[in-house]
Amino acid sequence: MPTTDAPADRVFAALASPVRREVLRLLRDAGPQPVARLAGSFDMARPSFSEHLRVLRECGLVSERRVGRQRLYQLEAVPLTEVRDWLDPFERFWRGKLTDLRTVLDTMDEDADG
């Protein structure tokens, strides 16, 4: 199985973790937040949580900036847009399949009525 270090691969790997997805949700819903507030939402050691933030930073899903003594994290949506663009053909594929299924089911209903 080929392995690459393409940006999209790193984003998909980051999104594989429920903790990292929850961090992204928190940042999406509440905007930029200090590390302490984000970490307070999880029952894990601070070094473990910091590792999750590092992964998100390295793939570009979050950015970090210092404000005084705090480090604020902010959601960066561009990598998610690239993932959405990659997934879009699959969504169209399944939409087409569901439309075909609806057509078959409608035909079966008509045959049962007639």
Image: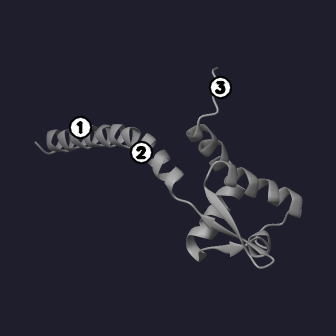
The type of residue carrying mark 3 is Thr
Q: Position of residue 110 (x, y in %)?
A: 14, 43
> Is 62 rendered above or below residue 14?
below
Q: Which secondary structure lies at badge 3? A: loop
Q: Whole-Å distance between the Cαs marked 3 and 1? A: 41 Å
Q: What residue did someone put label 2 on?
A: 85
Q: Residues within 10 Å of mark 1 (few under 14, many from 20)?
A: few
Q: Position of residue 27 (x, y in %)?
A: 62, 69
Q: Which image quarter holds the C terminus?
A: top left
The type of residue carrying mark 2 is Asp
> Is 53 rendered above or below residue 34?
above
> Between disc 2 and disc 3, whose residue precedes?
3
Q: Residue furthest top?
A: 1
Q: Which secondary structure lies at badge 2? A: helix
Q: What residue did someone put label 1 on?
A: 104
Q: Is residue 31 left or right of residue 53?
A: left
Q: What residue did someone put label 3 on?
A: 3
Q: Position of residue 89 (x, y in %)?
A: 37, 38
| Nearer the observer, 96 or 33 | 33
Q: Which image quarter holds the N terminus?
A: top right
Q: Position of residue 18 (x, y in %)?
A: 68, 54
Q: Is residue 37 left or right of residue 48?
A: left
